[in-house]
Image (tube, rainbow, N blue to C red):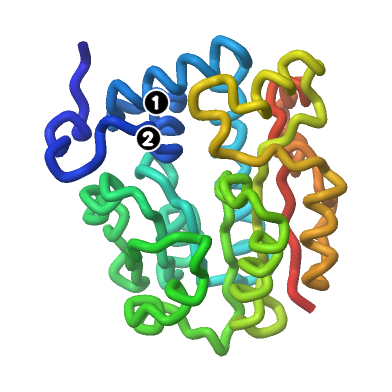
């Protein structure tokens, strides 16, 4: 068995329960995961064989969204919630290639991510990064954290990145309130970039298996429809950038790249501006 960092810190985190960040790490080919994460990930992959494609395309969306926000909209501050374990081209790396003075705050609730904070916090000298151990379900605690205030200037535009995290908030009202709380603390010209798992493009039998909770690990997420996600954005008065809400692989793909079929991805993505 290939050992990763997770195996060496198993005494400090719960290795018996699968965690989304570590499961995602496994699908991306990482080694920072436990047996429980791999078993859960394999069970999902057995039902939805394209899950690794979905994970890769979700990650590519993050990188393109950060690039668009930094290059075309002048965003120099990012609040990345549900950041997961570090991999190639994290938010601060993409942003600081465009402007080394960019500032990023990462937020996650997996203790293993904390052990990797040093890698996440490796900022360009001109910029700054910070890591907060917190949960999207308590957005007030994120905003009140002194490390956020020390890193980001909330009087200036900030891009909130909710990448593959909002679908772990089951209650629609709570999801709506999380967005409202975060964006409510930010000035006009701020942005929300999100991705969200969906069953809209899946065959009925696969959708039923993934959303019924019968497959280990699937009961932890809410596969909202496109109309449900649109309603969350509309409720908060956000203005969608082109091409609007679409499959992540079809959101401003890089030149010469042919996106995989929507049913192989089944993740929506959007970037929206606070007017």
Q: Which residue is mark 1?
A: 26
Looking at the picture, how far across and down is residue 51, in whole percent?
Answer: 58, 22
Evaluate whether residue 105 shows in this view.
Answer: yes
Disc 1 and disc 2: Cα gap in Å?
A: 6 Å
Evaluate whether residue 254 shows in this view.
Answer: no
In the picture, the disc for residue 154 is none
Q: Quadrant of residue 186?
A: bottom right
Relative depth, front residue between 223 and 76: 223
Looking at the picture, how far across and down is residue 167, in whole percent?
Answer: 62, 45
Relative depth, front residue between 208 and 199: 208
Element at badge 1? helix
Question: Which residue shows up at 29% across the image and 60% down it?
Answer: 121
Task: Indicate whether 245 appears above or below 219.
Answer: below
Q: Which residue is mark 2?
A: 22
**Tag 1–tag 2 contact (CB < 8 Å):** yes
Question: Which residue shows up at 78% across the image and 71% down it?
Answer: 236
Residue lying at the far bottom of the rendered structure: 155
Element at badge 2? helix
Q: Quadrant of the N terminus?
A: top left
Q: Quadrant of the C terminus?
A: bottom right
Q: Is residue 113 left or right of residue 88?
A: left
Looking at the picture, how far across and down is residue 153, in whole percent?
Answer: 48, 85
Relative depth, front residue between 217 and 103: 217
Q: Residues within 10 Å of mark 1 (few under 14, many from 20)?
A: many
Question: Which residue shows up at 67% across the image and 19% down it?
Answer: 209
Q: Is residue 114 left or right of residue 205?
A: left
């Amino acid at each position: 068995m290939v050992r990763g960092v997770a195996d060496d810190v198993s005494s400090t985190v719960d290795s018996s329960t699968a965690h989304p960040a570590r499961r995602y790490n496994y699908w991306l080919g990482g080694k920072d995961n436990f047996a429980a994460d791999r078993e859960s990930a394999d069970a999902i992959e057995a039902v939805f064989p394209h899950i690794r494609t979905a994970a890769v395309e979700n990650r590519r969306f993050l990188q393109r969204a950060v690039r668009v926000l930094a290059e075309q909209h002048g965003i120099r501050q990012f609040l990345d919630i549900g950041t997961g374990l570090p991999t190639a081209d994290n938010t601060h790396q993409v942003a600081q290639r465009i402007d080394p003075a960019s500032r990023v705050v990462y937020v996650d609730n997996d203790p293993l991510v904390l052990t990797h904070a040093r890698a996440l916090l490796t900022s360009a000298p001109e910029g700054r990064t910070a890591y907060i151990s917190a949960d999207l379900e308590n957005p007030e605690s994120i905003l009140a954290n002194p490390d956020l205030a020390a890193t980001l200037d909330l009087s200036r535009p900030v891009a909130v990145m909710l990448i593959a995290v909002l679908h772990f908030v089951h209650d629609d009202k709570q999801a709506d309130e999380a967005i409202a709380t975060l964006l409510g603390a930010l000035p006009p010209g701020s942005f929300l970039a999100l991705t969200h798992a969906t069953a809209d493009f899946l065959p009925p039998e696969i959708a039923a298996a993934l959303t019924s909770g019968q497959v280990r690990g699937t009961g932890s997420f809410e596969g909202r429809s496109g109309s449900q996600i649109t309603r969350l954005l509309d409720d908060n008065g956000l203005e969608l950038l082109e091409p609007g809400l679409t499959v992540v692989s079809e959101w401003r793909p890089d030149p010469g790249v042919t996106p995989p079929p929507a049913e192989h991805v089944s993740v929506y993505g959007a970037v929206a501006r606070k007017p």
